[in-house]
Image (spheres, rainbow, N blue to C red):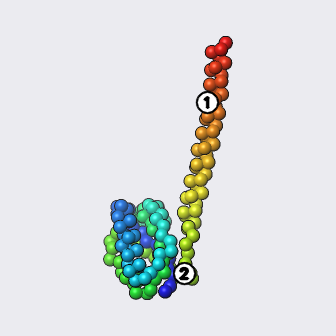
Amino acid sequence: MRHYEIVFLVHPDQSEQVPAMIERYRGIIESQDGVIHRQEDWGRRQLAYPINKIYKAHYTLMNIECSQQALDELTSAFKFNDAVIRHMVLLRDGPISEASHLIKKDESRGDEERRARSSDDDSTSDSEEDETADDNAATAN
């Protein structure tokens, strides 16, 4: 069996159906003894260029290992699903199970935001303590 990387774009009006679509495609792969090494839902993102007057799409990435028959069935499912506006299948040398660059970037951005929030909380609590100390000193006088 060969390793493939698949990215498909779903019409933004059909975003709520993405989990069901992923399960359907997962079933196609696993029913023919395929393996899914990585599956990422990148969410709704801006397209690089409009496709049929659509400016955003819901992106999904899958790294799979499957037979040619399973891949043919999967690509025909993409073609006959009107909600899938684009799909791309790439042949890979081996399985890829680590998080993609986009996911790592989002996680690091989330870590930075958490650190910023915690430092903001620390600075506001310090200033609140200073104000409380000033208020106590003023009432003591």
Which residue appears at 47% of the width and 75% of the height? 36
**Image x and y of residue 113, in percent:** 58, 49
For residue 114, above or below residue 55: above
The quadrant where residue 83 appears: bottom left
For residue 126, above or below residue 113: above
Using residue 38 as the reference point, say whether residue 112 is left or right of it: right
Using residue 107 as the reference point, say whether residue 27 is left or right of it: left
Using residue 134 as the reference point, say whether residue 95 is left or right of it: left
Q: Is residue 68 visible?
A: yes
Q: Which residue is mark 2?
A: 92
Q: Is residue 89 visible?
A: no
**Image x and y of residue 39, in percent:** 48, 70
In depth, the one of 122 and 49 nearer the eye is: 122
Q: What is the count of numbered marks?
A: 2
Real-space CA distance between mark 2 and mark 1, rounded to the nearest whole angstrom: 56 Å
Residue 128 is labelled as 1
* Amino acid beneath label 1: Glu
For residue 141, above or below residue 85: above
**Image x and y of residue 92, in percent:** 54, 81
Residue 40 is labelled as none
**Image x and y of residue 78, in percent:** 37, 76
Instruction: Answer few, some or many: residues within 10 Å of disc 2's Cα (few below 14, many 20 plus, some between 14 and 19).
Output: some
